[in-house]
Image (cartoon, rainbow, N blue to C red):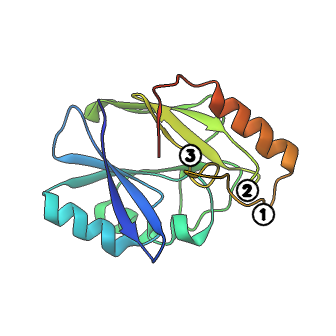
Amino acid sequence: MLEVSPVRAFSDNYLWLVRAPDDRRGAVVVDPGDARPVEDALARDGLALRAILVTHHHPDHVGGVQALAEKFRIPVYGPAREHLPCDVQPIDDGDVVSLADLGLEFRVMAVPGHTLGHVAYHGHGALFCGDTLFSAECGRLFEGTPRQMLESLDRIATLPDATRVY
């Protein structure tokens, strides 16, 4: 089972720190809107950041990406159809992000609605869906249409019932 820890950021948000199954000191962070809480969590838990996964371009999801990428010299995977604040390895629907040395692999799902290029990462029984889905609602439509959001939510609903949603 994938070990995922929430990292509190801002007054109302969480970032997700994923421990690598094959390298217990390695970690991946999803949507680091702020670098400081990620750095604090890494230091506290004795982890080495090895990659960043980005779901969309909003500042509360990418504000810390450049600082972390520069400090740790790690790859950043992000949606090909979004403008992000640093160089990324562009990913799109159907791509697979394989971090073989960490024992991690995620299938990329396009989930437009909140933003047009929004993606989610699915693997190891988990889904990292950014602002497409919350515990009691879906994300606000900033760029997409209601039809796009509904299709994205319908797509998420096809995942196995045991999928843990982050």
- Mark 3 to mark 2: distance in Å? 12 Å
Label 3 crowding class (10 Å Cα cut-off): few <14, some 14-19, many 20+? many
Mark found first going from the N terminus, 3 or 2: 2
**In the rendered view, does 74 fall on the left or right side of 63?**
left
Q: Which mark is residue 115?
A: 2
Query: Regarding mark 1 in the picture, which secondary structure is present there?
Result: loop
**Amino acid identity at mark 2:** Thr
Label 2 crowding class (10 Å Cα cut-off): few <14, some 14-19, many 20+? many
List the residue tagged with mark 1: 142
Mark found first going from the N terminus, 2 or 1: 2
Closer to the camera in the image, 100 or 154: 154
Q: Nearer the viewer, mark 3 or mark 2?
A: 3
Outermost residue, front side? 136
Which residue: 63% across, 62% down?
57
**In the rendered view, does 69 fall on the left or right side of 72?**
right
Q: Which mark is residue 45?
A: none
**Amino acid identity at mark 3:** Cys
Query: Regarding mark 2 in the picture, which secondary structure is present there?
Result: loop
Query: Regarding mark 3 in the picture, which secondary structure is present there?
Result: loop
Q: Position of residue 144 (x, y in %)?
A: 82, 53
**Amino acid identity at mark 1:** Phe
| Picture layout, residue 70 above or below residue 47 | below
Mark found first going from the N terminus, 1 or 3: 3
Say whether marks 2 and 1 touch (CB < 8 Å): yes
List the residue tagged with mark 3: 129
